[in-house]
């Protein structure tokens, strides 16, 4: 009886689509000027996710942060100048992923970027196509809900994400990904890629039926 109850509980839990941590970054030991920030925890069956900088940004020291300098004031200028952080999400061969959310801790100096905008290669990197624009938020934790975006569900990738920083009053201002504890986290689910197509399944079913009829006749 006890085993049956436990078995039922497992079956019920498995039926609930809960998100897993696909990747997370804790940057507390960073000096700021690292060339890249690979996720320090990665779920299985996914390619390594690593944050790098767009060509418009330069590196600068700041403890505990994946940091950058050279941000623009307006989002349009930030886009044309390539003032962004970027990372690409891709499943391992034979797998697919669905994304639920991205949580990011932002921190900047007084003249650094006060605003951030998240884009993906699904919608393109054009102003107006951002998943989220967090304007004048300063030092804060922001969450992007990705569940409703069709292009980010049951995909094998690669999908590039860019976080543009803007609202900087001086290019010497610094900004980046930094907060308490975990500094960035991508949640979702990873599953084996769906392989047999309905037409193939129907054909297999028809074959089995034909075989059964032949056996009956003989
Ligand atoms: Ca810091
Ligand atoms: Ca941290």
Image (cartoon, rainbow, N blue to C red):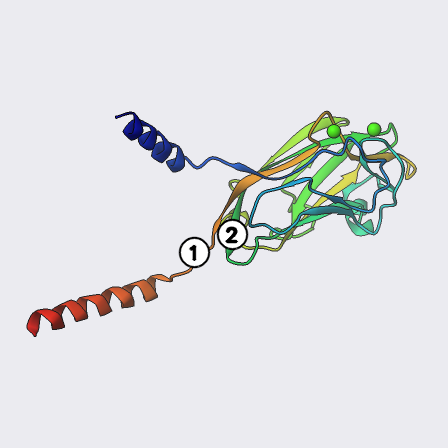
Q: Tell me the SS state at disc 2.
A: strand
Q: Is residue 146 visible?
A: no
Given residues 56 and 60, the one toward you in this image is 60
- The residue wearing badge 1 is 194
Asked whether the residues under the numbered discs 2 and 1 touch, taking CB atoms below 8 Å apart as contact, a structural biologist would say yes
Side of 33 relative to 164 (left or right): right
Q: Quadrant of ligand 1?
A: top right
Q: Residue placed at 73% from the left, 25% from the top? A: 180
- Ligand 2 lies under 8 Å from the Cβ of mark 2: no
Residue 139: x and y in percent read 76, 26
Side of 183 relative to 10 (left or right): right
- Quarter of the view holding residue 4: top left
Residue 174: x and y in percent read 86, 35
- The residue wearing badge 2 is 96
Residue 32: x and y in percent read 85, 37
Q: Tell me the SS state at disc 1.
A: loop
Vertical placement of 111 versus 212: above or below?
above
Q: Quadrant of the C terminus?
A: bottom left
- Ligand 2 lies under 8 Å from the Cβ of mark 1: no
Q: Residue placed at 31% from the left, 31% from the top? A: 8
Residue 6: x and y in percent read 34, 28
């Amino acid at each position: 009886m006890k085993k049956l109850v436990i078995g039922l509980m497992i079956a019920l839990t498995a039926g609930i689509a809960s998100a897993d941590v696909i990747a997370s970054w804790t940057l507390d030991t960073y000096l700021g000027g690292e060339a890249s920030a690979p996720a320090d925890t990665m779920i299985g069956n996914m390619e390594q996710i690593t944050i790098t900088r767009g060509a418009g940004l330069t590196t600068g020291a700041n403890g505990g942060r994946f940091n950058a300098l050279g941000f623009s004031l307006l989002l349009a200028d930030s886009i044309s100048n390539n003032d962004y952080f970027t990372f690409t999400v891709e499943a391992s061969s034979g797998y697919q992923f669905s994304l639920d959310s991205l949580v990011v801790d932002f921190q900047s100096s007084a003249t650094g970027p006060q605003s951030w905008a998240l884009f993906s290669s699904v919608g393109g990197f054009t102003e107006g196509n951002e998943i989220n624009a967090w304007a004048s938020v300063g030092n804060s934790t922001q969450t992007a809900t990705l569940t409703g975006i069709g292009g980010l569900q049951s995909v094998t990738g690669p999908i590039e994400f860019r976080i543009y920083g803007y609202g900087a009053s001086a290019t010497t201002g610094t900004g980046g990904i930094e907060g308490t504890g975990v500094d960035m986290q991508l949640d979702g689910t990873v599953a084996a890629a769906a392989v047999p197509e309905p037409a193939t399944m129907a054909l297999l079913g028809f074959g089995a039926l034909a075989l059964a009829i032949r056996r009956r006749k003989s």
